[in-house]
Structure formats: structure tokens, C-alpha cells
Image (spheres, helix red, strand yellow):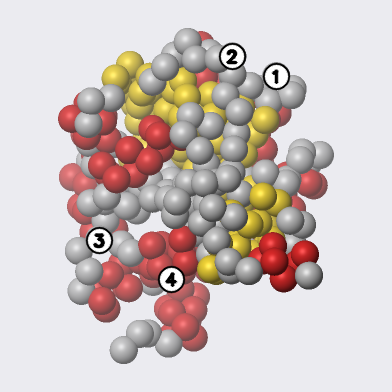
Amino acid sequence: MPLDPWDIRLAFEHGQNVTEMLRAETHADVNTEEAIETAYDLQAGSYVRSMSNPEMLAHKRDYATALVAHLSGLTEPTSILEPGVGEATTLRLMLEALPPGIDAHGYDISWSRVAWGCRHLADHGHRATSLVVASLLHQPYADDSFDVLYTSHATEPNGGREDEILRELYRVASRYLILLEPCWSSASPEGRARMERLGYVRDLPGRARALGMTVIDHAPFAHVMNSLNPTAITVIGKNTDAPPARPRLVCPRFRVPLLDRGRHLYAPESMRVYPKIDGIPCLRLNDGIIASAMDTVRAG
């Protein structure tokens, strides 16, 4: 029987790790998407609030500036995507460090975090209309949609799904995929025990090479807030001389074009409608509703 949502909320408020708790309750070998969504949704707002702490803001600014330096040394992107964008705290600082005019997008599995991210970007004068709710495993974008994809501890809780996620991220990237993710090899014994207990990813560069991807660089990343969770930067090249990419939303199930109809998005070829909640497109697989009569009824 599923845990009562109120019990989950109380456990979170008492400091219990929700993904760890739900994995134990369901006897799952990996963190499910529902467990990850629940855990991060309960944290919604905490990342934006943390930016009022001068030490955290300085750390995040240094982190974003260093990432931009890596990115700028590789290419001059016209478009970027941040999977697992959360509350857009990293994306906001990236936009402040990158040249103006870049087409920036992001998505997260948690609607509440995306809503906070839209507010955070708007509060700092950035366009917030390119954030959507989506899954790392089924991104609602066409192949080669973005010059650069970068992650910031987005794959972290998905241990056991490394290959699936790497394939999907690589599919949507045109030139480069940059991963800022936990580094098992640099972690202390205590840190490794924590990563194992929480179901974190491991050996992303090794898995990428095994999948036939070109790993250009893999090294420790200097800007780490939690010593038990060291970060590495992994740069994967795809078609590094590709022309500027054109971001395109598609049905996440069948990858056919999505038409924006204002209050929802419709994919005629897959007969699926995806809703918007307070203007935020919800584009996970289970958000789609089969509505083959959409155009007929509207036309009539």
C-alpha cells in the first residue's frame, strides 16, 4: 500500500531523506521517478531562499562562472538546455555570465520547482517561458535541439539508470554534453557510503565511453559545497562543428511536433494533448492525454 502523502511530508519535515525512505518502503533497487519527484518537490523554494545567504550566492556565482568558462572554451553556443533545472538558480547565474541573446531552456521533474524557477528568472529580468516539466528519461525535444546541454547534479539520484540517461541527454545535444555530477572516485569512504546509500550515479565517463561517446575531458570540479559529495566535470563531444541548433518541442512519447495552443500543447501525429498548469507545460509521459478529436471538436 502506498505511503500516505501526509506521512511523507511529516518525514521530510523531520529531516528524513525521502528518496531513501521510499526506496526502502517499496523495496526498489533504484530511486523511482515518483520518489525523486516527491523528494525534490517537497524541497521547492529552498534553493531560491538559499540565494539570500551571501556565502551561498558567492559559491553559486563562482560555480556558474567556472562552468561558463569551460563552455566558452569549447564553443559559442546559440542555445543551451539545463536538464534538472530545479529552481533555475544555476541557470540564472549562467545567463548573467554568458553573452546576451542565448536561447536558454530548462526542465525539471517537479512542477513546484519549475514554478519557483520561473519566478526566480522573472525576478532577475530573464525570460521564464522556456521552462517545462519533463523527465530525464524522455525529454520533450527533437534530436540535436541544443548546441550544448549541461547538468548540475541532475542525474545524481538516478544510480542504475546511467546508460538510459546518457543516451537520452546525448540525443538532444548537438555539439556538447557537459556533466557536473557526483564523482565516486574523488569521494572519501564516508562520501562513497553516502552515495551508495542514496542511490547516486557512478562512473559516468566510463559508461559514456562504453556507449561509444567521445569523452573529451573528465576532471574534479573546484567549486564544491559538500565535501561528502565532490563534483566532477565530464565533457562529451558530439558533432562539435554542427551549425547552430534549433530547439524544438516534441511529444515525449513519439517525438513528433508539438503545437502550442495557448492553454495546452497538442501533437496531432500522436493524438496527445499536454496541459499547462499556471502556464507551465507539463510534458512527462503520463501527462499526455489521448485526444484524437481535438481538432474536429475545436473546428466544429
Q: In this rendered view, identify the residue nearer to me: 213 or 219.
A: 213
Give the number of the disc on residue 15: 4
Residue 46 is at least partly visible in this image? no
Q: Residues within 10 Å of mark 2 (few under 14, many from 20)?
A: some
Spatial CA span between label 2 and label 1: 9 Å
Snapshot quadrant of residue 2: bottom left
Q: Residue at x 72, y 71 (%)?
A: 297
The residue lying at 36 percent from left, 23 percent from top is 236
**Which residue is painted at 22% across and 31% down in the image?**
211
Q: Nearer the viewer, mark 3 or mark 4?
A: 3
- Helix, strand, or loop for circle 3? loop
Query: Pointer 2 and pointer 1: residues touching (CB < 8 Å)?
Result: yes
**Residue on which the image places disc 3:** 30
- What residue type is disc 4 on? Gly
Q: Earlier in the sequence, mark 1 or mark 3?
A: 3
Residue 213 drawn at (x, y percent): 28, 25
Between disc 2 and disc 3, whose residue precedes? Answer: 3
Mark 3–mark 4 distance (CA, rounded to whole Å): 21 Å
Q: Mark 1 = which residue? A: 99
Mark 4 or mark 1, earlier in chain: 4
Pointer 1: residues within 10 angstroms few (<14), some, or many (20+)? few
Could you tell me the amino acid type at mark 3? Val
Relative height, residue 31 to residue 249 (above, below): below
Closer to us: 188 or 165: 165
Q: CA distance from mark 1 to mark 3?
A: 39 Å
- Quadrant in which the N terminus is drawn: bottom left
Q: Nearer the viewer, mark 2 or mark 4?
A: 2
**Residue 76, labelled with which disc?**
2
On the image, the x and y values in percent for residue 117 come to 66, 51
Q: Secondary structure at mark 1?
A: loop
How crowded is the residue under tag 3: few (<14 C-alpha within 10 Å), some, or many (20+)? Answer: some
Camera-side residue of 243 and 17: 243
